[in-house]
Image (spheres, grey):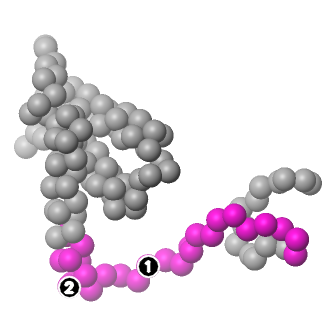
Amino acid sequence: MKDAVSIQSEPCAKGAKQVWVRDGTPESPQTNEQLRASQAKQRKDEEDARSLARTAGTDRQTSGTVYYNNSDADNARQRCNSAKQQAKVIRDRDWKRLTVERLRQLDAWVESECKSKSK
């Protein structure tokens, strides 16, 4: 079959063209030190995401979005959905220029917007 695309666990057959490779080896459990470093990085990513949101004008403080007659849960859901939509627009528009670090910041921002604010 000409120009067929396949996803496989084995190397490509002779004459086939390999376009993309992803290592599927599971990661080993993190040590306590790695876990602390990961948590510190997540906090930094969240701060970077907040900064990115401020720069993009999409942070809660400057967006001016007002939701009337909605519960806190509705507001949180709308905020989360809005963040997901904005992230999709950014990914679709800038996919060639986005670095892995910028994608992580974007994901951290969406995650922070989708966290439940009610306690």
Image point 22% across, 60% down: which residue?
45
The quadrant of the picture occupied by the N terminus is: bottom right
| Residue 54 coordinates in the image, percent (x, y) | 16, 41
* Rendered image quadrant of residue 94: top left
How crowded pointer 1 is (Cα within 10 Å; few <14, some 14-19, many 20+) is rated as few
| Residue 61 coordinates in the image, percent (x, y) | 9, 33
Frontmost residue, 71 versus 7 = 7
Q: Residue furthest right?
A: 1
Q: Earlier in the sequence, mark 1 or mark 2?
A: 1
Looking at the rendered structure, which numbered label has been put on residue 33? 2
Image point 76% across, 59% down: which residue?
6
The quadrant of the picture occupied by the C terminus is: top left
Query: Is 78 located above or below residue 70 in the figure?
Result: below
Residue 19 is a magenta residue: yes
Looking at the rendered structure, which numbered label has been put on residue 27? 1
Magenta range is: 14-39
Three-letter residue code for mark 1: Glu
Looking at the rendered structure, which numbered label has been put on residue 60? none
Image point 27% across, 86% down: which residue?
31
Q: Secondary structure at mark 2?
A: helix
Three-letter residue code for mark 2: Glu
The answer, for residue 12, to whether it is visible in the render is: yes
Query: Is 31 located above or below residue 60 in the figure?
Result: below
* Rendered image quadrant of residue 102: bottom left
| Residue 55 coordinates in the image, percent (x, y) | 19, 42
Q: Secondary structure at mark 1?
A: loop
Query: Is 28 located above or below residue 68 in the figure?
Result: below
Frontmost residue, 17 versus 114 = 17
Query: Is 93 located above or below residue 66 in the figure?
Result: below
